[in-house]
Amino acid sequence: MNIYPRNILPVKNVRRFIVIFYIVGVLGFIIPYSREIFKIITPLALILNIYLLAIYHKDFGIKDIFVFIFVLVVGFIIEVLGVKTGLIFGSYSYGDSLGFKLFDTPVIIGINWLFLVYTSTSVAEYLKFKKSIVIIIAPLLMLLYDFVLEQVAPQMDMWSWYESLIPLKNYLAWYIMGLGFVMLFKVYKIDTKNPVSTLLFVCQFVFFVFLTFFLN
């Protein structure tokens, strides 16, 4: 079966599209007149990311599907508990730019957890770390990603904190969750060698770095 763009476009063209996509995204957010539009389409961008990962993933066996659904569902449930109790990450609430909410939590946030676990693991493996080191490095990459994202999330109407400072337990919870999910990937031997995953992680990270300078 031909799946667009896999089997139709060369991977290098897809990679070029990803880079251009994020450049346009940066411009869309830093230009005041287009910022609100780009906030609205943020969920579509996240869906596009996971779609590209999915079509280039090598094997959708039962164990892969189980692990992906587990990360997605558990990630969402923990976020719901975090919003409702404030005990996991601290006291925060979600804005409107991440789309439809269930229990005051964007449904797409589970997809974002899956995206980050997959791509951060892929990056760590791309850097040729040993399996035991990948389990440590991949959550650290997720933690670094979160640290940068936290600087612009309120301006992008993703979420906001009730405290004046982001609590340390937010970052601790991120690392522990990331560690658990990456270990699950390794236990079930999920193959994250994906021709677009590393680029997607890097582009999204750089995207938030740029916005940190322009939106703060």
Image: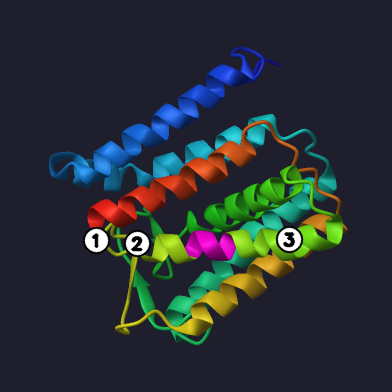
Q: Which residues are magenta?
A: 142-146
| 143 w.r.t. 206: above or below | below
Mark 1 or mark 2: whose residue is earlier in sequence: 2
Q: Quick check: is 145 in the magenta stretch?
A: yes
In depth, the one of 214 and 79 nearer the eye is 214
Mark 2 or mark 3: whose residue is earlier in sequence: 2
Location of residue 53 (image quadrant): top right
**Label number found at residue 100:** none
Check disc 2 and report the residue beneath it.
153
Check disc 1 and report the residue beneath it.
216
In depth, the one of 188 and 144 nearer the eye is 144
Which class describes the residues within 10 Å of circle 2: few (<14), some (14-19), or many (20+)?
Answer: many
Instruction: Residue 184: give x, y in percent of width and height.
Output: 79, 61
Which element is circle 1 on?
A: loop
Q: Residue at x 41, y 40 (%)?
A: 44
- Kind of residue sitting beneath label 3: Val
Which element is circle 3 on?
A: helix
